[in-house]
Amino acid sequence: MWLATTSIAAGCATLARFILPKKYKLDFLALMLWGAAAMILVDHIFGYEGGEFLEKTTDGMITNSTVLGLVMLVPVFIIWGVSLLIPRRTSHSARE
C-alpha cells in the first residue's frame, strides 16, 4: 500500500501544480513524489515472489502498510517545505 499512498500523493501534487501558483514549487514536490513512486514500483517488481502485489502488512517496525506509506511521505514534505524557505536566485546580467 505504500506504493498506492505515494502514487496518490504524486497525482495530487501534479494536479495541484496546475491549479496553484508557482511560488509553492509544486513541480519540485511532484518530481520527488513521482521519483519515490517509481523507485517503490521497481522495488515491488524485483521483490515480487507471488501473492499480493500491494501488501497490507509489513514485517518491519510499522506493521500497517498504509501508515508506512504516510511515514515515508514525511521526509519528502519536509524537504519540500525547506525548499519553500530558500529564495530563488535570479540571474542578473549586470553582475557578470
Image: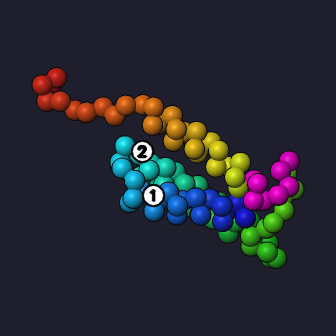
Structural distance between the alpha carbons of marks 2 and 1 = 10 Å
Up the image or down, 93 lies above or below 58; here it is: above
Mark closest to the chain's N terminus, 2 or 1: 1
Residue placed at 66% from the left, 61% from the top?
Answer: 5
Is residue 63 found inside the magenta-colored segment of the image?
yes
Residue 67 horizontal side relative to residue 33, left or right: right
Q: Marks 1 and 2: in contact by CB < 8 Å?
A: yes
Marking on residue 16: 1
Tell me if I can see residue 14 in this picture.
yes
Q: Residue lying furthest front in this view? A: 20
Q: Quadrant of the C terminus?
A: top left
Residue placed at 73% from the left, 64% from the top?
Answer: 1
**Residue underneath mark 2:** 24
Give the SS element for disc 1: helix
Q: Which residues are magenta?
A: 61-68
Residue type at tag 2? Tyr
